Image: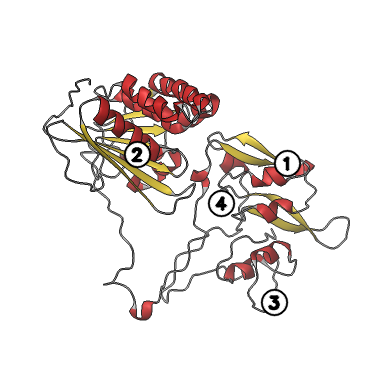
Amino acid sequence: MNACVMPDPSGFFEIRFESIGGLGAHAAGQILARAAVLKMNLNGSHFSSYGSEKKGSVIRSYVRLGAADKPIRTSAPIDSPDVIVVFHGALLKQDITIAGMKDSGTLIYCGAPDEIPEMLEGVPAGARVIRIDATNIALEELSRPNAVLLGTLTAAVPFLDADIVLNALTEKFAKRNPQAAASNERAFKRGAQEFELLEGIGKGSGDLPVIRPSPILGYETAPIGGVIPYSGNMVSNDLSTSRTGWMPLFTDEECIHCGLCATVCPDFCLVWNHQQINGDLPQVRLKGIDYQYCKGCMRCIETCPTEAMTRVTETPGLADQLRVPLYSHGAPKPRGKKGRRKWPQKTTPSCRIPRKRITRAESYFNPKTSSAETRRQPGLRGTLDFT
């Protein structure tokens, strides 16, 4: 067993993985902790925190390492880590992603070359910022981003033996899938070599404050009768973090507007409208995709009979450039004094129909339903756009 000298033998070295479900953060934490305990003569613990077990949901994985003679007697989440590893660049839009970062810490984030999110200005000035294009490397090597980021982590943290961590990664997949083990090895080595150390990015002063998320309502703050005064957040949701390097591309010239893609889209991110062609009655036509609600499941591509939907590599800014907003008036405005949303008073065209509950499928293809009216129905998002 190899001896390992930590930066501070009297304390712990803590690592926090910020990721979404499907990118392998939990597996990366397991591999790293196992390698440290079994091969590096360290004490270690690993645990993850996540909600629903599905692709796209936020997950945090924690690795706490200590010297062999220093027992670990806590399983509390790591609020002030020495290293933060961000598996998806979109997570940097949230303050909690880099919360608790030390002025002497290290931030490793997944990003394309020359991509520097504005959020990084809040990073402490004394911290190291490392960028690695883990998504594209994983796609090229037929691997996962976790293998790439593990390689970058071992290169950034000297006391972590890269060979030991790579062997632990290989052993996990060697028996089940030898091809995957070879792909992971190539991705790991590229991650250890192709990262960029960014200088002068952070402008913050001192350690960042800790943010501990807590529920809005609890047993002390819940309204009488169990009433939930807050409506759903379907409109404000951002599913773009669920995409892992690929996105659907819509080509209007190839589309026959059959609607098969709408029947399989789980998030109703397709935007439809009515167009009057050759003086006939208005016909339903597909206008585009609102990538804010697209998680990249590619079901529309599998269903399209004319290849109007194709899969392309997602490059920085491409989704924003091609996005067709599902809501012509944008996201809901803040609540008024009485707790009611301030929706636009007029829409185009103006339609007055009896208020009734309309299913999502009906809202796509019912020419008599205005987008504003369907938005007033609870639990609906996929609507027609008359603009």
Q: Nearer the viewer, mark 2 or mark 4?
A: 2
Q: Residue at x 24, y 25 (%)?
A: 40
Residue under label 1: 251
Label 3 to label 2, Cα distance in Å? 50 Å
Residue under label 3: 353
Q: Nearer the viewer, mark 1 or mark 2?
A: 2
User: Is disc 1 in contact with disc 3, using a CB cutoff of under 8 Å?
Assistant: no
Q: Quadrant of the N terminus?
A: top left
Q: Quadrant of the C terminus?
A: bottom right
* Image position of 8 with respect to 273: above or below: above
Q: Residue 33 location in percent, x, y? A: 29, 34
Neighbours of disc 3 within 10 Å: few (<14), some (14-19), many (20+): few
Residue type, numbered disc 1: Thr
Residue under label 2: 17
Residue type, numbered disc 2: Phe
State the colouring used for the structure image.
Answer: secondary structure
* N-term mark: 3 or 2: 2
Q: Quadrant of residue 216?
A: bottom left
Q: Residue 264 location in percent, x, y? A: 67, 53
Q: Is residue 292 left or right of residue 65?
A: right
Residue under label 4: 293
